[in-house]
Amino acid sequence: MGALTDALADAARSAGAVLATGHEAVRIDTDGRRAEVTYRTADGEGVAAARHVLVNASPQRLAALTGDTPPPPAEGAQLKVNMLLERLPRLRDTSVDPREAFAGTFHIAEGYAQLAAAHAQAAAGDLPAAPPSEIYCHSLTDPTILGPDLVERGCQTLTLFGLHAPARLFERDNDAVRADLLEATLAQLDAHLAEPLADCLATDADGRPCIEAKTPLDLERDLGLPGGNIFHRDLAWPYAQDGAGRWGVETPHANVLLCGAGAVRGGGVSGVPGHNAAMAVLEDLTG
Ligand SMILES: Cc1cc2nc3c(=O)[nH]c(=O)nc-3n(C[C@H](O)[C@H](O)[C@H](O)COP(=O)(O)OP(=O)(O)OC[C@H]3O[C@@H](n4cnc5c(N)ncnc54)[C@H](O)[C@@H]3O)c2cc1C
């Protein structure tokens, strides 16, 4: 991923693009032909003017920026846990090498009946008793995501994706519910391990275990994902509805286009919305 995004950034810069991070868009004014984006940085506010504005933020955020009516609210339903380990945990099944087990997707409490039970509990407003989740070890696939010193030490990353954890379950007390769900989720994982996962976690300079859990409410606060929905809105079928527009990136404003997950059939790391937004701009410029 690093090589891909570096190559994209290099291609953009060599075509004359200026890449600026740390700029929060706070307003978009447009007459359909020319637009102004007001942004905020650590140093204050500024304005950028352009013929076209491509928006990667969610449709909810876009509506707030333009002052339009927002789309229906969205809701995410996942717990995300990122971990840095000193070593991969040993498995209860001694015939399997942990490097093989964690090289693919490691499924926990994800049998059909378990998923159905967890869904029913979450739909009734309770945390799943045996929370289903799956784990990926990205550092086995691509060790370059870790610094050389961590690779040398034999460290690995684990990332856990927990299912059936809708945002509404966290509303009464996000911190407390996050802690409860994390504990229940890791207990399901520990049932398959010959040593507790906690014993394998690396620690930071202050001696704290390197583990962080994010609820849908955390993702809404930190990344502006509506209701913590990782796809910005519910995926829909059929996806080429009437009125979707030619490229599926259109908004009520002719020169403001979505280029992210909120575009038609946009969720996931497909790159399709960016391509489609670029095509819409090219078509507009070349008539
Ligand atoms: C935990 C998790 C696991 C996932 N797993 C997978 C997976 O396995 N496979 C898959 O295909 N997809 C997965 N996804 C979904 C995928 O990551 C998203 O669909 C994809 O990142 C959407 O890309 P995007 O660029 O459209 O939007 P985002 O990645 O949401 O980016 C939007 C950006 O806009 C910024 N922003 C918002 N408002 C403003 C503003 N006012 N001014 C400036 N910037 C703003 C945000 O900070 C953010 O950086 C996962 C998502 C999450 C959260």
Image (cartoon, rainbow, N blue to C red):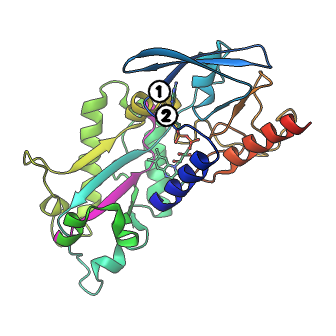
- Name the amino acid type tagged 2: Ala
Q: Is residue 74 left or right of residue 124?
A: right
Q: Is residue 287 left or right of residue 103?
A: right
- Outermost residue to the left: 207
* Disc number for residue 20: 2
Q: Which residue is mark 1?
A: 23
Relative to the observer, which residue lies in front, 142 or 81? 142
Q: Are marks 1 and 2 in contact (CB under 8 Å)?
A: yes
In reply to whether residue 158 is colored magenta, the answer given is: yes
Relative to the observer, which residue lies in front, 11 or 280? 11
- In the rendered image, the quadrant that contains the C terminus is top right
Ligand 1 within 8 angstroms of badge 1 C-beta: yes
- Name the amino acid type tagged 1: His
- Residue 75 position, x and y percent, is 53, 33
In the image, the segment drawn in magenta is 153-167
Ligand 1 within 8 angstroms of badge 2 C-beta: no
Does residue 67 sit above or below 228 in this rendering?
Answer: above
Residue at (23% x, 76% y) in the render? 92
| Residue 213 occupies quadrant | top left
Q: Is residue 111 left or right of residue 176?
A: right
User: Which numbered mark, 1 or 2, is in the foreground of this view?
Assistant: 2
Residue at (86% x, 40% y) in the render? 283
Relative to the observer, which residue lies in front, 82 or 272? 272
- Outermost residue to the bottom: 95
> Tag 2: Cα neighbours inside 10 Å, few (<14), some, or many (≥20)?
few
